Amino acid sequence: MTATHCLPFPIRPLLCLVLATAPAFAQNPNARLTLPDLTALPGQTVTVPVLLDSSLGPIQGWSFSCNITAPLVVASEAAGSTTAAFHGGAGPDFLVATIFSGQGYTVGCVISFLGLQTLPNGTGYELHTADVTVPTGAAPGTVYPLAFASPALGNPPVATVVVVGGQSIVPMTTAGSITVGTPATVTAFAASDCPTATLGSLVSLNPPALNTAWQLEVQGLPAAATHGFYALGLTPVAQPMAAFGSPCTLRVSAELLGFALAGGGALQAYTLTIPNTPSLSGTSVYVQGLHDGAPVPPFSNFFALPNAYYFTNTVAGQLGL
């Protein structure tokens, strides 16, 4: 980013405070800089914000060293939404940032040379952002730390401070991290073993990523099909259904049984909502379809129901990002 070079004399002391070597002051509990805990896939670039909460009074500027070390790569940096909004969207009077390869980046900011605008008390102020790339070969579960001023970067080192009334105040800091997540995938688990030509195939239209809807379809249904079921479970089984009047095998533990009607295009669609719960990442869900378009013999006695059910192939979905 670029800096303003023509500095009025009264501003120079303020800049010296903002861009000074880290002072030996205790951290003030009335201000806090925070880096978040994020999750990313191998090779993915994520945006890491620097957030400020403060009740110190009007803030005139700030500086900080943000430590984002190799093998993470700081691809770029930019003013955060709060910083960019000063002066009607023109940004602060002085803003300079420097990326240190393999180490992180530093920022120095003066909101207004003439004191015409300051940052009031508040929470969740986004001061700056960095686009950070995770190594392509990173193993799921790897945790990369994000921190402030450990060590301070630059020569001289850039202090992590906020400026109030022309005085540098050391804020509390909260470190963050980037955790490498598990990718969401879908794999074929087992083919249908019903003793007839294929009567519909279970397909996944998208991977079962956290905080999304997993779209499933049984495609290629026979004309007689009107409805069906989706058996979803966390454990694969091999349960022959002969005792229940069917020559097919159920391959899903069936903790969940979803109902589906036949739709246009000779298919039955089903949607499973995946919650945004990180602890579910890496969990496998097995899915098998059952539909009523099977020929009557030898399926007609299945559970003594009036419909004959064909058991489709089974797929395994691994929940993830």
Image (cartoon, helix red, strand yellow):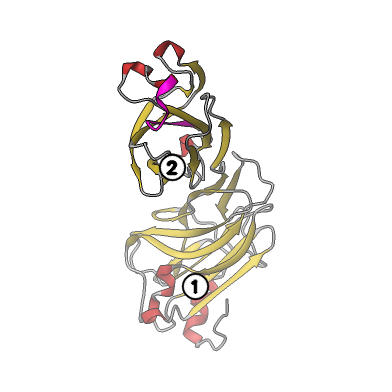
The kind of residue on which mark 1 rests is Cys
Q: Give me the residue at 57% from left, 31% from top.
A: 189
Element type where label 1 sits in the image = strand
Residue placed under numbered mark 2 in the picture = 217
Element type where label 2 sits in the image = strand
The kind of residue on which mark 2 rests is Glu
Label at residue 308 = none
Residue placed under numbered mark 1 in the picture = 109
Q: Nearer the viewer, mark 1 or mark 2?
A: 2
Locate residue 2: give its quadrant: bottom right
Q: Give me the residue at 43% from left, 74% from top.
A: 84
Q: Per the image, is 289 magenta? A: yes
Let me know if residue 122 appears in the view: yes
Front one among 270 and 76: 270
Front one among 287 and 61: 287
Total marks placed? 2
- Indicate whether 35 appears above or below 216: below
Residues shaded magenta? 286-297
The furthest residue to the left: 306
Q: What is the distance, in whole Å, between disc 1 and disc 2 at their CAs?
A: 54 Å
